[in-house]
Amino acid sequence: MNAPYSAVHFTTYETAKRGLMEISPESASEERLVVHATAGAAAGGLAAAITTPLDVVKTQLQCQGVCGCDRYSSSSINEVIRAILRCDGYAVLMRGWKPRMLFHAPAAAICWLTYEAMKSFFEKLNDHE
């Protein structure tokens, strides 16, 4: 789940950042922190939404056999997805997507904002020396 999440996250961040910088390039340096926070939130939210089905599968595997949850004959992602679809339908694969987005979007915004601010700080510090 982490590899697809990271792939979507980094791709979306870079694309969103580039797009936001092109909207008003003359003020890009002044609005840089807002751009990073916005691009980070978009990246975190989109990556969370897209990888929600994988998170559902992971949770099903972690909880199998506990408190009446189903047990699966193997830990195959395909087998778990087929079982979920057979019993509950497609909508269940997106269970929890809103809370995941509400968690990951601000977390990613804070993370990218902090990273880019510190990167800028150290670049300026290095230029003065």
Image (cartoon, rainbow, N blue to C red):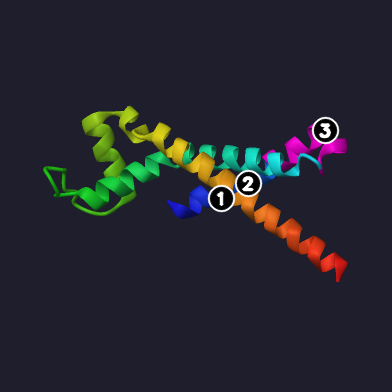
Q: Which mark is residue 97?
A: none
Return the residue at label 1.
Answer: 7
Return the residue at label 2.
Answer: 11
Question: Comparing marks 3 and 2, which lies closer to the viewer?
Answer: 3
Tell me where residue 115 appears, x and y as whole percent: 64, 55
Return the residue at label 3.
Answer: 24
Magenta residues (range) = 16-29
Sequence-first tag of 3 and 2? 2
Disc 3 crowd, CA 10 A, few/some/many (<14, 14-19, 20+): few
Mark 1: which amino acid?
Answer: Ala
C-alpha span from label 2 to label 1: 6 Å
Q: Residue 81: within the magenta? A: no
Tell me: 119 left or right of 49: right
Mark 2: which amino acid?
Answer: Thr
Tell me where residue 66 appears, x and y as whole percent: 14, 49
Residue at position x 16%, y 43% in the image: 69
Element marked by disc 1: helix
C-alpha span from label 3 to label 1: 27 Å
